[in-house]
Image (tube, grey):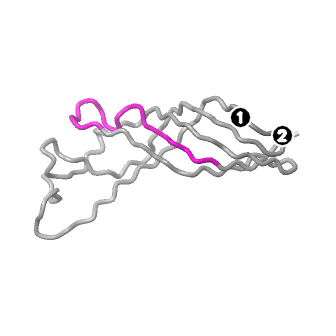
Amino acid sequence: MSYYRNSDGYRAATLRNEHYMISMPIGLDYTVIGGKKINLSVASTIQPTYVFANYSYLISSNLKNYAKEPSLNRRWNINSSFEASLNIQKGDYKWSFSPQYRYQLISSFKNKYPIKENLLDIGLKVGIIKTIH
């Protein structure tokens, strides 16, 4: 039973879908041009991902109603990414600025839920790496 609908109803409602996850990127980084101080590189990763909090609404199979049903959400997933980075070395620190394309390879929901969702993120990644001697 749900009070939230995908069509005109009594009043509008705002539903917030939030996913909080942590992942470990495993991949390759290749320097395309440049030296040790400044360079441009491309990278690709596979990221095993654990979803530790999921506050999302599911849409019904007739695409008319929304409901919360956390048991249908996957806890583990796999993401992939591609990025191009501008890297600047300054002393023991390396600054990295890169647009990143990230795609979820497996649906957010378990197989018994009929609708598939694969998240796609496009964003800017900023990193600081400290060299430890």
Residue 103: x %, y % from top left: 45, 38
- Residue numbers of the magenta segment: 98-116
Residue 45: x %, y % from top left: 57, 32
Question: Residue farthest to the front?
Answer: 33
- Was residue 103 drawn as part of the magenta stretch in this picture? yes
Question: Which image quadrant for residue 36?
Answer: top right
Residue located beneath label 1 in the image: 32
**Rendered position, 18 above or below 60:** below
Q: Residue at x 16, y 47 (%)?
A: 63
Name the one closer to the observer, 103 or 56: 103
Residue 124: x %, y % from top left: 57, 52
Which mark identifies residue 106?
none
Name the one closer to the observer, 73 or 59: 59
Question: Residue farthest to the bottom?
Answer: 11
* SS assignment at label 2: loop
* Residue type at the position of mark 1: Val
- Asked if residue 71 lies left or right of residue 129, the reply is left
Q: Residue at x 49, y 40 (%)?
A: 102
Name the one closer to the observer, 15 or 52: 15
Q: Residue at x 58, y 32 (%)?
A: 44
> Which mark lies nearer to you, 2 or 1?
1
**Rendered position, 120 above or below 80:** below
Residue located beneath label 2 in the image: 36
